[in-house]
Image: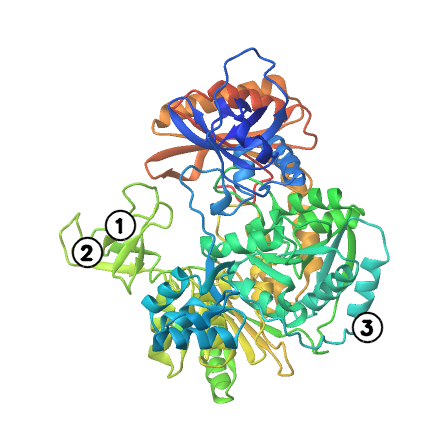
Amino acid sequence: MVVGVLVELSNKNIDKVFDYNVPKELESNIKIGIRVEVPFGRQVLDGFVLEIKNENTQELTLKDIISIKDIDVVLSSELLELGKWMSKDNLATLISCYQVMLPKALKAKIGSKNLLKMDIFYKINDIDISEYKLSEKQKQIIDLCLEKDLVIKSELTNISLSALKTLVKKEILVEEKKEHYRIQYNSEKQEKKILTNEQQNVVNEIENTCDQVYLLHGVTGSGKTEVYMELIEKQLTLGRSSIVLVPEISLTPQMVSRFQARFGDKIAALHSALSDGEKYDEWRRIARGEASIVIGARSAIFAPLKNIGIIIVDEEHSDSYKQSDSNPRYSAINVAIKRSKYHNCKVVLGSATPSLESYARAKKGVYHLVNLLNRVNGKELPEVKLVDLNEEMKTNKSYFSKVLINSIKECLKNNEQVILLLNRRGHSSFITCKNCGYTFKCPNCDITLTYHKTSNTLRCHYCGYGDKKANICPECKEESINDLGCGTEKIEEELKKELNCRILRMDYDTTSRKGSHEKMIMAFKNHEYDILLGTQIVAKGLDFSNVTLVGVINADTSLNIPDFRSSENTFSLLSQVAGRSGRSNKTGKVIIQTFNPDHYAIKYTKTHDYLSFYKYEMNIRKTLKYPPYYFLCYIKLSGVDANYIFLEANKIKRSIERNLNGFSILGPTPCTIFRVNNIFRYGIILKYKKEENLKELLEKVLDHYKNNKNIKIDIDFNPSQIF
């Protein structure tokens, strides 16, 4: 028997199947989609079996596979086909597409550990034990085993490990091993909520029509999650499974909690906050059919479910559904639609602020639009007040306007809670010398260092470089170091000076420990804190009944980013965080501090007017030839020699101009951050209405440079961000 194996190395030169002979003793265990260990040159590598052939047709001497790593198939026939589609769609190596689908323990990776966790149990053997002379400790163990069919090892070793070993040796006790899942779900279910008429109408419309993709445009607090659960329950009754995607890890615990209350232990979670062992357990529970509802972030779209009945993408506007930092640069929404075709199921994209691309498709009838226009509690959306910081700063040098600080005090007096948003972590945006103007920059990147006061370090948020904060300027040698701008750390410090209250800071720095998101959310929900201060982590999906005030410290941080989506991202972020206020019977209020109160993204947030924002932004996109009117392709070229990269980028640009018509080409220009980790980066942006032969041409470009170690080329279709 001969098998075709795709090895673990993600290199365009070896992005193909290699033939290996299967020794007779291993033939019965060979299946397509399992991992095997193979010799490859002078190395030993892991790989996936993609083909099974009866004989060697090449008349070559083939090497034998070394071992088989799996009993069960790791990649189903559906996932194997999905990987091939992703490889072509994203111009990525096939192995990178398969690796991104799997938890670490199941990737093709030599040296990967077996993370199976086993519990050891003991039971009485079917023999006459009256003949044996037993010690008192052995009798205690026997008595315990007589009480139960199986006794876990930990209960018996508390008595005596040596007595236990003796009983096993004498075959009085029999040892059994059982697999143990690290995450345990409560099987008890709570009663479901009764849907409002508006929610029920949406459920009926989705269930009783035959479209493939539905866009659920529902205002914040309109009960989209209850609609999702009702749709999923219908699929469960039909014996079908479901996937629910959420954009942030921080949202997963709350979503899991709500779904567990409704569906018990039928759920499984897949996200990056889980340990390798937990992901391994969850993956196998899903593959075995023990869980039929999968909840998680982007990569949960690859869950090995069979017979999928519905795929939900919550907060579909979020750019976290696009993998932007590494290959394959896939869109989880595109993958969801592809999987839905295979399973003949529906995809529901939900958001209070749908992406312009999605809403435009809904308006054209490509997606089926359904609306939830009212909050479940019957209340109006919260009142939004804009504070002009240009005027405020003439008389007030604080980070908090008078109206915001007074509103916070009023909330605290009423025993209510507050959420404050500042989309910038750290203490200060940058550190400078007020004597000579020297600014502390990363030695590896073209970016200023951010000051983190709790650790007294300057950090680069791009390459991870860190250094202790200096008190003396390295340029003029004066002790005149000043910190400018502010992050969540500084705001927390200033709040503590202003108010006597309990403040919980939630950003990347405070949530990096395992389980920290969940603990923080529960602590705030239980009113152990009065104010939740954070970056965009606090803006989406969180539901706290006692929050009556949301404050935005500076609405302009996302507005000033050089990206064509900055206005859309600002409107979405502000609308989402505003929606955290007044979600129960208490009236909510939102205060947004800004230097740009007349900017349309901020003005339309004040009136909760998505449709007016959509129309205004669409006119700009049409004029400037940006999505959804045009498709984008971003070609990023990088290397250690900036001049060489620029010359090669121009060659690629000329090749595109010669071979393709109807394309607008911008660049090559230095990327927003020109140097990252001592690597220089140039970008080329392509705008087009029809793809024509673009992918074929870019495939040739990648082939041309595949052996060139002086240049790296990354291609991103419809990028979520250009940097």
Q: Quadrant of residue 394?
A: bottom left
Which disc is residue 470 wearing? 2
Is 341 situated left or right of 506 in this image?
Answer: right
Q: Where the N terminus falls, by quadrant?
A: top right
Badge nearest the viewer, 3 or 2: 3
Q: Quadrant of residue 432?
A: bottom left
Q: Residue furthest left?
A: 477
Q: Residue furthest front?
A: 131
Q: Residue furthest top?
A: 59
Q: Secondary structure at mark 2?
A: loop
Q: Residues within 10 Å of mark 3 (few under 14, many from 20)?
A: few
Task: Estimate the x, y position of residue 461 in percent, counting from the top left.
Answer: 37, 50
Q: Which residue is mark 1?
A: 440
Label 2 amino acid?
Ala
Instruction: For residue 63, say whether it is visible.
Output: yes
Task: Estimate the x, y position of residue 110 in percent, counting from the top left.
Answer: 42, 37
